[in-house]
Amino acid sequence: MVHVRFEGRSYDVAERQVNINTGMNDTQVKAQLAQYFDVHRDRFSNYVIDRPQSGDLIVRPEAVYG
């Protein structure tokens, strides 16, 4: 499962829906998500991808404090 926080909304999508597999790096994952959301890939440039032991992916905006 891919959990995405994009533009203030949360989405849960299956890897196959966005053509993501476990061997992909962060750049490739972001490119697939940009294609899925029909936006330019730069929109995901400041996003972080967490890879917990569960095997899911969590894609979220980079946290900025201060």
Image: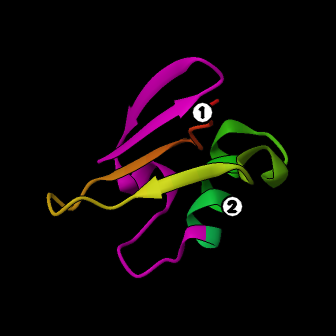
What SS does tag 1 mark?
loop
As drawn, the label of residue 31 is 2
Q: CA distance from mark 2 to mark 1?
A: 26 Å
- Name the residue nearer the viewer: 48 or 25: 48
- Residue 40: percent from left, percent from top: 85, 47
Is residue 35 shown above or below 66?
below
Residue occupying image coordinates x 38% and y 55%: 15
Q: Residue type at mark 1: give it.
A: Tyr
- Residue 59: percent from left, percent from top: 48, 46
- Residue 25: percent from left, percent from top: 52, 77
Is residue 34 shown above or below 12?
below
Q: Nearer the viewer, mark 2 or mark 1?
A: 1
Q: Earlier in the sequence, mark 2 or mark 1?
A: 2
State yes or no: residue 49 in magenta: no
As drawn, the label of residue 65 is 1
Name the side, left or right, on which 12 lies relative to 26.
left
* Quadrant containing the C terminus in the rendered view: top right
* Residue 29 placement: quadrant: bottom right
Residue occupying image coordinates x 65% and y 70%: 27
Name the side, left or right, on which 9 lies relative to 15.
right
What SS does tag 2 mark?
helix
Provide the residue span drawn in magenta. 1-26
- Residue 63: percent from left, percent from top: 56, 38
Residue most extreme to the front: 66
Residue occupying image coordinates x 32% and y 61%: 51
Neighbour class for label 1 at 10 Å: few (<14), some, many (≥20)?
few
Q: Residue type at mark 2: give it.
A: Ala
